[in-house]
Image (cartoon, rainbow, N blue to C red):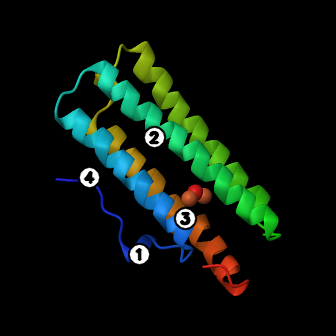
């Protein structure tokens, strides 16, 4: 069973970013599945890296869209992104230091799930309202 599912409650009402969020949900689920299946460290490390890389791409895309449209809360949103990246890089560092899979527990998976849901339902949905008012959806 998947750890989490994208649902309309997570919609920011901007298609490009809803699609990217769906991909992030998929990647968190892939990591969860890999953990549950007891996959080796190499496979887990690759999946974790895919999640980190796609997160970076996604954050950059959002920041560019916010900047191009004069979003007044860009600096605050960027700071949130930086905090999230720091947290997930810290997780990756622990994963590498502890020779892998042991760090990827259900606690960590719940943390990643909450990390995504809270950010999307918090600051992401705010920019959605702003962009919709500018005719972007
Ligand atoms: Fe969808 Fe601000 O990350």
27 w.r.t. 63: above or below: above
Circle 2/circle 4 CB separation < 8 Å: no
- Label number found at residue 17: 3
Asked whether mark 3 and ligand 1 are closer than 8 Å, the reply comes as yes
The Cα–Cα distance between marks 4 and 1, rounded to whole angstroms, is 16 Å
Q: Quadrant of residue 123?
A: bottom right
Label 1 vs 2, first from the N-terminus = 1
Task: Report the disc number at residue 9.
Answer: 1
135 to the left or right of 4? right
Q: Residue at x 55, y 64 (%)?
A: 17
The residues bearing labels 3 and 1 have C-alpha atoms spaced at a distance of 14 Å
In this rendering, the label closer to the viewer, 3 or 4: 3
Earlier residue among tags 2 and 4: 4
Residue ID for mark 4: 3
Element class at badge 1: helix
Residue 51 has which mark? Answer: 2
């Amino acid at each position: 069973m998947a750890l989490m599912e994208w649902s309309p409650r997570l919609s920011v009402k901007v298609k490009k970013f809803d699609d990217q969020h769906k991909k992030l949900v998929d990647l968190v689920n892939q990591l969860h599945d890999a953990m549950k299946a007891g996959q080796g460290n190499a496979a887990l490390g690759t999946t974790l890296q895919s999640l980190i890389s796609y997160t970076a791409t996604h954050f950059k895309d959002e920041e560019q869209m916010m900047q191009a449209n004069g979003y007044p809360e860009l600096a605050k949103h960027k700071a949130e992104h930086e905090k999230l990246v720091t947290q997930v890089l810290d997780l990756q560092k622990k994963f590498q230091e502890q020779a892998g899979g042991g760090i990827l527990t259900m606690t960590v998976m719940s943390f990643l799930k909450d990390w995504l849901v809270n950010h999307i339902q918090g600051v992401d949905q705010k920019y959605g309202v702003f962009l919709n008012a500018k005719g972007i959806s």
